[in-house]
Amino acid sequence: MKFSSRYLVVHLLLIASVLGACSGLNRSDEPANKTWWLKPYTGMVQMAFPTAILPVAVDVTVVPGLDTNRILTLADNAQLNHYAAARWVDNTPELLTSLTSRTLLATGRFQVEPGRSMRRAEGCRLQLEVKEFFATITASGQTTSVQVAADGKYLCGPGSPIAITLGAAVPVADESMTGIVAAFQQALDEVMEDLLNQL
């Protein structure tokens, strides 16, 4: 009788530990991921259609470290990190390619074409390398500003390419993720407006 009681107790403990381990797979102390959206800049929509709409291929690359969907931070000591549980809707190159393309389309001056399928003779090409796309933080972790910067060139026709230099720094007044994303949106709008003025 004692043997069967011990046997039953051991089996009950084993079942309880297995059930506890399985339920742990469904729960996590990690905060749930939140995905954040940015909009293309549409502040320079052309009211009248131009005489010719330019076909343009858009090619956006990023420097090492920025190719991620995480919302990045850069500390005073040059440490690159990210906000926990906060992500963009896509990785930075794809996100910024889409935003740049939709900004160009919104002007009514451009028709965006797939970059790799178009030769220079057929249209224009915008090439950008993003060098900054992060929030700057202090050593204590306080977010101070959002930095967006890119360099590149615009090639259209037989002439020399136009050198493009873009940059914006927007202070962060509200350190919530909503406030930080709003600062990213403002910085992106400033950069896109500058881009359109340079083309």
Image (cartoon, helix red, strand yellow):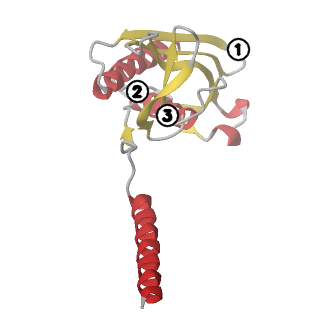
Sequence-first tag of 2 and 3: 3
Residue at numbered disc 3: 70
Q: Amino acid at mark 1?
A: Gly
Q: Secondary structure at mark 1?
A: loop
Expressed as whole percent of the image width and height from the top left, the position of residue 49 reads 39, 29
Residue density around tag 1, few if under 14, some if 14–19, many if 20 or more, within 10 Å: few
Sequence-first tag of 1 and 3: 3
Q: Is residue 119 visible?
A: yes
Q: Amino acid at mark 2?
A: Thr
Q: Is residue 122 left or right of residue 183?
A: right
Expressed as whole percent of the image width and height from the top left, the position of residue 188 reads 42, 20
* Occupied quadrant, residue 64: top right
* Residue at screen point 44% across, 41% down: 89
Q: Is residue 121 left or right of residue 127?
A: right
Expressed as whole percent of the image width and height from the top left, the position of residue 153 reads 64, 17
Residue at numbered disc 1: 159
* Residue at screen point 43% across, 33% down: 84
